[in-house]
Image (cartoon, rainbow, N blue to C red):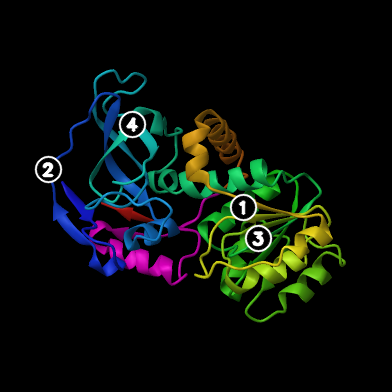
């Protein structure tokens, strides 16, 4: 099979496309023929050695995928060769085949295409864990989504609307905000042109957002936190802007607010049943048309570095996928 290989930590351009032996499943494992693999910002950090978890070198990056079961390991129940599945694994998805533990797979819903199936695990899983579990967003509350046109941002908008909240989307261009509007955002803020604090004051009549969904960090976190409502929750999802902000703790004291960490990968590891329940809820919302994942571009396996570079440069709207 062909696979992308990271031999040493470095930029995406250092990745290699190699021919590797077809994998064989061990006990409790399944080999899946990959039809589409989702690209995420943690993939960029992982190949650079900057992510929270460093896989042993060499490795194949990529952790979410959709495909067809090719082989079953000893003891595997509930799946058969030819089944269409969605999966999540630490590494290995940017390849023609991937090995995954059976408990990392779930059946694809009837009628769902592979691109969509590969685009929902991490982004929607992260946003559901953040908004529903960690942020406890309620109907009638207001949520600000920073970096709102990205994969997790659009997922957060849709989940917020599914819960009955009012959603303010902040992004870096009019084109990106148009996408946010199409996915349900009630208020749009271009934070490259507008003063974020003043715009939030106007949008909330001075009250501020109850929940701040922050996958961006950098220069936007502090003005957002300064605008938060009483008893607000600032969700720390990631740092796509590059810099980890240093926030003054007195802001949380003055607003009775909370800064809440969101680490979906560890949540999946520690609370798999809760994650599975969240995914089932979201698949139900998708069937009702409340969640509509946007896959904006497809890259062949040989162009994986280009996909990661586009992600790093924040050129991606919604999700992009690798198609082996």
Position of 111 relative to 229 (above/below): above
Q: Is residue 152 visible?
A: yes
User: Who comes first in sequence, dot 4 or dot 2?
Assistant: 2
x, y percentage for residue 257?
Answer: 77, 55
Residue 278: where, in percent of width, then height? Answer: 57, 35
Q: Which residue is mark 3?
A: 145
Q: Quadrant of residue 298?
A: bottom left
Mark 2 and mark 3: span between their CA atoms? Answer: 43 Å
Question: Which secondary structure lies at badge 3?
Answer: strand
Q: Which mark is residue 21?
A: 2
Q: Are marks 4 and 3 in contact (CB under 8 Å)?
A: no
- Is label 3 in contact with label 1 (beta carbons under 8 Å)? yes
Task: Give the residues drawn in magenta, as a range.
Answer: 292-320
Label 4 crowd (10 A; few <14 / some 14-19 / many >=20): some
Query: Reading the chain from its start, which is encountered first: label 1 or label 4?
Result: 4
Name the residue at 29% across, 66% down: 10
Residue designated by label 4: 101
Residue drawn at (42%, 68%) of the image: 312
Answer few, some or many: residues within 10 Å of disc 3's Cα (few below 14, many 20 plus, some between 14 and 19). Answer: many
Q: Is residue 323 above or below residue 218?
A: above
Left or right relative to 203: residue 218? left
Mark 1 touches mark 4? (CB < 8 Å): no
- For marks 2 and 1, give the CA distance: 39 Å
**Outermost residue, bottom side:** 193
> Looking at this view, is 246 or 87 the one in front?
246
What residue sits right under mark 1 in the picture? 156
Q: Which of disc 3 and disc 2 is earlier in sequence?
A: 2
User: Tag 1 or tag 3, which sits nearer the N-term?
Assistant: 3
**Residue 25 located within the stretch drawn in magenta:** no
């Amino acid at each position: 099979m062909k696979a992308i290989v990271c031999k040493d930590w470095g930029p995406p351009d250092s990745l290699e496309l190699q021919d590797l032996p077809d994998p064989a499943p061990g006990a409790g494992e399944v080999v899946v023929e990959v039809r589409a693999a989702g690209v995420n910002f943690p993939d960029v950090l992982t190949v650079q050695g900057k992510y929270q978890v460093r896989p042993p070198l060499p490795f194949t990056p990529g952790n979410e995928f959709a495909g067809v079961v090719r082989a079953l390991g000893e003891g595997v129940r509930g799946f058969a060769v030819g089944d269409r599945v969605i999966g999540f694994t630490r590494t290995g998805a940017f390849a023609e085949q991937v090995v995954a533990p059976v408990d990392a797979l779930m059946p694809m819903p009837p009628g769902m295409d592979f691109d969509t199936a590969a685009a929902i695990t991490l982004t929607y899983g992260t946003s559901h864990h953040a908004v529903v579990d960690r942020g406890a967003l309620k109907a009638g509350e207001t949520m600000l989504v920073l970096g709102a046109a990205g994969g997790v941002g659009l997922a957060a908008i849709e989940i917020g609307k599914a819960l009955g909240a009012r959603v303010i989307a902040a992004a870096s261009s009019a084109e990106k905000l148009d996408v946010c509007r199409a996915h349900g955002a009630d208020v749009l803020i271009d934070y490259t042109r507008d003063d974020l604090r003043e715009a939030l004051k106007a949008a909330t009549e001075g009250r501020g957002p109850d929940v701040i969904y922050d996958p961006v960090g950098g220069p936007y976190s502090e003005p957002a936190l300064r605008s938060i409502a009483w008893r607000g929750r600032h969700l720390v999802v990631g740092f796509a802007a590059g810099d980890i902000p240093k926030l003054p703790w007195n802001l949380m004291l003055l607003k009775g607010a909370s800064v809440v960490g969101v680490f979906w990968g560890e949540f999946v590891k520690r609370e798999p049943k809760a994650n599975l329940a969240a995914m089932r809820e979201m698949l139900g919302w998708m069937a009702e048309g409340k969640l509509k994942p946007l896959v904006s571009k497809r890259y062949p396996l040989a162009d994986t570095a280009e996909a990661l570079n586009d992600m790093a440069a924040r050129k991606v709207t919604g999700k992009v996928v690798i198609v082996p």
